[in-house]
Structures are given as C-alpha cells and as structure tokens.
Amino acid sequence: MIKNKEFEGQLTISNFPPALETDLTKLIRNFCQRAYERDPMDRLISINQLKNQHKSASLVITLTENQLAVKLAKKIKEVFKKAKIEISYSPAPSDVVYIKLTFNNL
C-alpha cells in the first residue's frame, strides 16, 4: 500500500497552537507504533505539514487502516480536550475515511 501511495485513512489536524506541534507528532508516532506492534498491517504512512495563507499550519497524517485513523483522532481529542472531529467515509466499495480534527482556541 505504501509503495503504491494507497491509504485507507487520512487525518487533517488544523488550527492547533504551534507550541503543541511537537507533542502532537510524538503522540501520533507513539500511538501508531503501538498499533503496529499489535498488528503489522496498521502503519503510519506519513505526517506532512501544510501552511496556508493565514500562517497557521495543518498536519496531514495518512495511515494504512481506516480504523486506526478513527482511533487516533479520538485519542487526540481525548488528550487535548478542545478539538472537534468530523468523520466522512468514502462511498462503497471504497473504505477510505477522511477525518478533520480542528482545535478550538486553547
């Protein structure tokens, strides 16, 4: 999947304070590492940082499994409290999930 640039989960995190970026990436990497140890099919493909016109950054995380993406989004919301999750699934037969996680003002 990684070689073919295929993914089942995409998580976009936006409006987070720049001070939390390091903590966010550590949380994501550690969560995905534990998931990989349980099931080698659960993998983190990439973490990309995007900057928009308003000088705020967004993180785009791609994962090999859609369930892993949903669990990761819920874990981030649980840890940082002030985040809103929007989950949208691709129509059948695809099983790709797109998640937008937006931080409220912290």
Image (cartoon, helix red, strand yellow):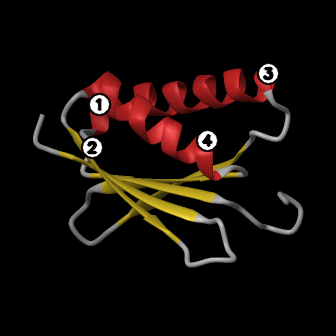
CA separation, marks 2 and 4?
A: 21 Å
Residue 68 — which label? 4
Image position, residue 66 (x, y; %) = 62, 52
Crowd rating for badge 2 (residues with CA inside 10 Å; few <14, some 14–19, many 20+): many
Residue 16 — which label? 2
Q: Is mark 4 on a helix, strand or loop?
A: helix
Against 28, residue 4 (above or below) is: below
Q: How many labels does the image show?
A: 4
Q: Which badge, 3 or 1, comes first in the chain's sequence? A: 1
**Residue at image mark 3:** 37
Against 22, residue 87 (above or below) is: below
Q: In which quarter of the image is residue 88?
A: bottom left
Quick check: 40 left or right of 95? Answer: right
CA separation, marks 3 and 2?
A: 29 Å
Q: Which badge, 1 or 4, comes first in the chain's sequence? A: 1
Q: Do the residues labelled 1 and 4 touch (CB within 8 Å)?
A: no
The amino acid at mark 4 is Leu
Q: Which badge, 3 or 2, comes first in the chain's sequence? A: 2
Residue at (33%, 23%) from the top-left corner? 79
Crowd rating for badge 1 (residues with CA inside 10 Å; few <14, some 14–19, many 20+): few
Q: Quadrant of residue 34?
A: top right
The amino acid at mark 3 is Glu
Residue at (83%, 41%) from the top-left corner? 41
Residue in the foreground of this view, choosing between 23 and 4: 4
| Mark 3 or mark 2, whichever is nearer to me | 3
| Mark 2 or mark 1, whichever is nearer to me | 2
Residue 19 — which label? 1
Q: Is mark 2 on a helix, strand or loop?
A: loop
CA separation, marks 1 and 4?
A: 25 Å
Residue at (29%, 31%) from the top-left corner? 19
Quick check: 43 left or right of 61? Answer: right
For the N terminus, give its image quadrant.
Answer: bottom right
